[in-house]
Amino acid sequence: MTVNSRKKTREIYELLPKLDCGSCGFGSCGKFARAVAEGRASPFSCQQNPELGYAIARIVESEAPTYGYSYQPSLVPSREVTPSPGTLTALREEVRGLSQGVDDILARIEHLKQRR
């Protein structure tokens, strides 16, 4: 680790919340700061405060995205999509079959208990 990398790690670490939540995938804020300084992680990986990514990106002299971090749902249910009756019937049959399988397993367990 170079002197410059140590300095960047320290600067990044000072910005972080120091919760060591591990949400970034590195287990601690210190490890995350080092990974970013070494170029192994995105400056925007802190899940506690993604907005810190802009300040961290300036420290590591990385280009930051120009868009904001507003809520944007990735999956929006479409009102046009409805399950077909055939799909529902097949699903009910599958559930019945699974339920019967569970009942059979529970009956075997009870039978084994009685044999003891």
Image (cartoon, grey):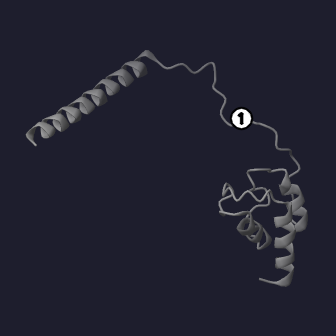
Left or right, residue 95 beside residue 37: left
Question: Residue at the location (61% across, 19% down)?
Answer: 80
In the rendered image of this protein, does residue 31 appear above or below residue 116?
A: below
Q: Position of residue 72 (x, y in %)?
A: 76, 36
Quadrant in the picture for residue 61: bottom right
Quarter of the picture containing the C terminus is top left
Quadrant in the picture for residue 60: bottom right
Q: Is residue 63 visible?
A: no
Residue, far bottom:
2
- Label 1: which secondary element: loop
Disc 1 marks a residue whose amino acid type is Pro
Q: Position of residue 79 (x, y in %)?
A: 63, 19
Residue, far front:
116
Q: Position of residue 42 (x, y in %)?
A: 76, 61
Question: Residue at the location (84% across, 72% down)?
Answer: 10
Between 26 and 54, the one nearer to me in the picture: 26
Label 1: which residue? 73
Question: Residue at the location (75% across, 55% down)?
Answer: 46
Quarter of the picture containing the N terminus is bottom right
Q: Is residue 88 visible?
A: yes
Question: Residue at the location (81% across, 59% down)?
Answer: 16
How many numbered badges does the structure rendering display? 1
Q: Position of residue 63 (x, y in %)?
A: 87, 61
